């Protein structure tokens, strides 16, 4: 069965960086993309960006692209999201999701990233 | 700054029918925006319901359907069940970027 399993809770100080992983299984990794979505507590979903697992082509949301890098490792079928220069308003649950041909289907369980001094 | 707008909240009676909509600040929503719909319950990850306007995933209950209605994407629930109480989000594609709507809190009462 398709699974996306994310890394655990992260607590960071302002200005630091965080890298969240999304290990996939149950499907052919390079045939799909991986997208990242975040949700500030009590608020809605925000699309951050996607990567093609096949050729590593990325698309990022304009408001965050300068601080965000999405990568993947085909040898371990894992996607990564790195966010730099963290601020308190980056405190959120970060989700990865599988994507193909404009269909976003399976989601990871979410990773809480807390930014506090 | 593209904005995708959903009804903030709706209430429906058990067994009733309700339609949630998803509008784009850029104009009419067409199939070229590849609308996706998701359900999210408190403390859970979102669950995909509909993709590319009206296609259901294998796990999507038959009472959920997607369409285009009056220049918007729409999600219709027919024969609403108590377990359908949740937040619903649409997702639209803008040539390389996706944008979520603000979500609709659906109350079943």
Image: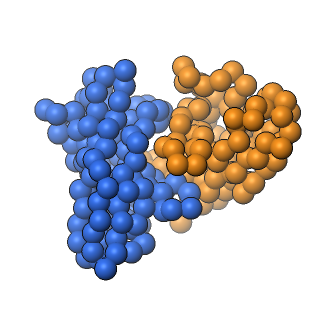
Chain colours: A blue, B orange
- Looking at the image, can residue A42 be seen? yes
Q: Is residue A77 left or right of residue B7?
A: left
Q: Residue at x 55, y 52 (%)?
A: B100
The outermost residue toward the bottom is A117
Residue depicted at 38% across the width and 57% down the height = A112
Asked if residue B34 can be seen in this view, the reply is no
Question: From the viewer's perspective, is B104 left or right of A47?
Answer: right
Relative to A44, say whether B75 is above or below. Answer: above
Residue at the image position 73 percent from the left and 47 percent from the top? B106
The quarter holding residue B80 reads top right
- Percent position of residue B54, x then y: 64, 28
Position of residue B38 in the picture relative to residue A29 (left or right): right
Task: Count numbered badges in the picture.
Answer: 0
- Write the residue at 81% across / 27% down: B79
Q: Is residue A20 left or right of residue B89?
A: left
The residue nearer to you, when weighing A81 against B73, is A81
Image height check: is A43 above or below A76? below
Relative depth, front residue between B3 and A44: A44
- Residue A87, position in %: x, y? 35, 75
* Image quadrant occupied by the C terminus of chain A: bottom left
Residue A111, given in percent of the width and then of the height, sits at 36, 52
Q: Nearer the viewer, residue A82 or A6?
A: A6
Indicate the quadrant where residue A55 lies.
Answer: top left
Q: Quadrant of the N terminus of chain A?
A: top left
């Amino acid at each position: 069965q398709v699974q996306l399993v994310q890394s655990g809770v992260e607590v960071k100080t302002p200005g630091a960086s965080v890298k969240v992983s999304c290990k996939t299984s149950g499907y052919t990794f390079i045939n799909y993309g991986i997208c990242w979505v975040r949700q500030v507590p009590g608020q809605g979903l925000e699309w951050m960006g996607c990567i093609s697992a096949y050729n590593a082509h990325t698309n990022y949301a304009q408001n965050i692209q300068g601080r965000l890098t999405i990568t993947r490792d085909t040898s371990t079928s894992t996607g990564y999201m790195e966010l730099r220069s963290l601020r308190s308003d980056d405190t959120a649950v970060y989700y990865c999701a599988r994507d193909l041909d404009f269909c976003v289907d399976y989601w990871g369980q979410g990773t809480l990233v807390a930014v506090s001094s | 700054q593209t904005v995708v707008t959903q009804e903030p909240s709706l209430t429906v009676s058990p067994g009733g029918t309700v339609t949630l909509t998803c509008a784009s600040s850029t104009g009419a929503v067409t199939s070229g925006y590849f609308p996706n719909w998701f359900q999210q319950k408190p403390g859970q990850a979102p669950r995909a319901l509909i993709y590319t306007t009206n296609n259901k995933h294998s796990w999507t209950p038959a009472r959920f359907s997607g369409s285009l209605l009056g220049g918007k994407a729409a999600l219709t629930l027919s024969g609403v069940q108590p377990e359908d109480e949740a937040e619903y989000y649409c997702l639209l594609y803008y040539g390389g970027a996706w944008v979520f709507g603000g979500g609709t809190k659906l109350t079943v009462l």
